[in-house]
Amino acid sequence: MIETGVLFDDIHSFRDLNLVLGPFVLPPAKPKTNFIDVPGRDGSIDATEATGEVKYNDREFSFTFTVFPQDELSFEERQTVVSNALNGKRCKITIEKDPDYYLEGRCFVNEHFANKKLRQIVVSVRVAPYKLKHNETVESFELSKYDEKTIILTNGKKRVVPSILVSTNHIYISFEGYTRFFAPNSQEYEDLNIRLKEGANVLTLSTTNGAGEVKFTYREGDL
């Protein structure tokens, strides 16, 4: 359980590094826009969704930490400990105020500041635009022989290809006009044609040869 601060993979900013988190702003992910100016035409052509969806830039921001006043190390020693632990590290970053999600990216220890009253260390990060849920979404469904079932898989903002595990018998899965036959397998399938969008996704499951079971596993992401 996170008490206060930030978790960098399994390194906690306070418990492990003796750093007290100061106020910070998590900036929103900025859309990648593409406006094409055409001479002789009013306005511009908006090609932002040329790929079928809006893409986003990385997020860049900083955490300002104050060294715990009763730190047993000197400021120079604490700088070394923090730099060794975080500088250049790519990791999952979990912020206490939003414990269900993590951001993924790279850390940079890029500033130290000290005077008679205050000792601070600034850690900057560049992370992917989506925050991801720590817990994967897992949905399992059972079918009897000659059964057909309509199911709904609910997803967050980030489009995602679920892992599909079929056991017991053959399963047909249909999604947005696409149908595929899945044989029982000890390994999970990933089919790029079954790509969940934001909100409710309707799929149809069917079997003819006997009872079957299918499990969908995916990690939801939001902005």
Image: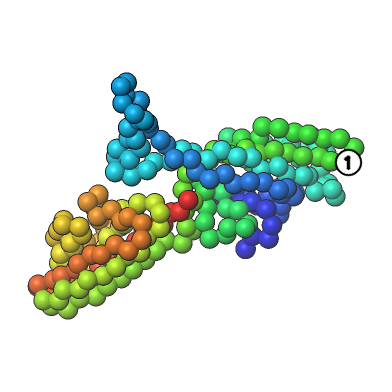
Relative to 23, is 203 above or below?
below
Q: Position of residue 85 (x, y in %)?
A: 64, 41
Whether residue 153 appears in this view of the structure is yes
Would you say residue 87 is visible in this rendering?
Answer: no
Kindly state the secondary structure of the residue where label 1 is placed. Answer: loop
Q: Residue at x 57, y 44 (%)?
A: 27
What is the x, y in percent for residue 98? 58, 58
Q: Extreme top residue here?
A: 39
Closer-to-camera residue (154/31): 31
Q: Amino acid at mark 1?
A: Lys
User: In which image quadrant can residue 194 be found?
Assistant: bottom left
- Residue in the image at 29% along x and 43% along y: 52
* Residue 187, position as x, y percentages in the image: 26, 58
**Quarter of the image where the N terminus is located:** bottom right
Q: Give the answer, above or below, for where 157 lies relative to 107.
A: below
In the image, residue 141 lies at what x, y percent? Answer: 27, 72
Residue at the bottom extreme, as displayed: 144
**Residue hosting label 1:** 117
Q: Residue at x 39, y 63 (%)?
A: 137
- Give neighbour class at mark 1: few <14, some 14-19, many 20+ (Cα, 10 Å): few
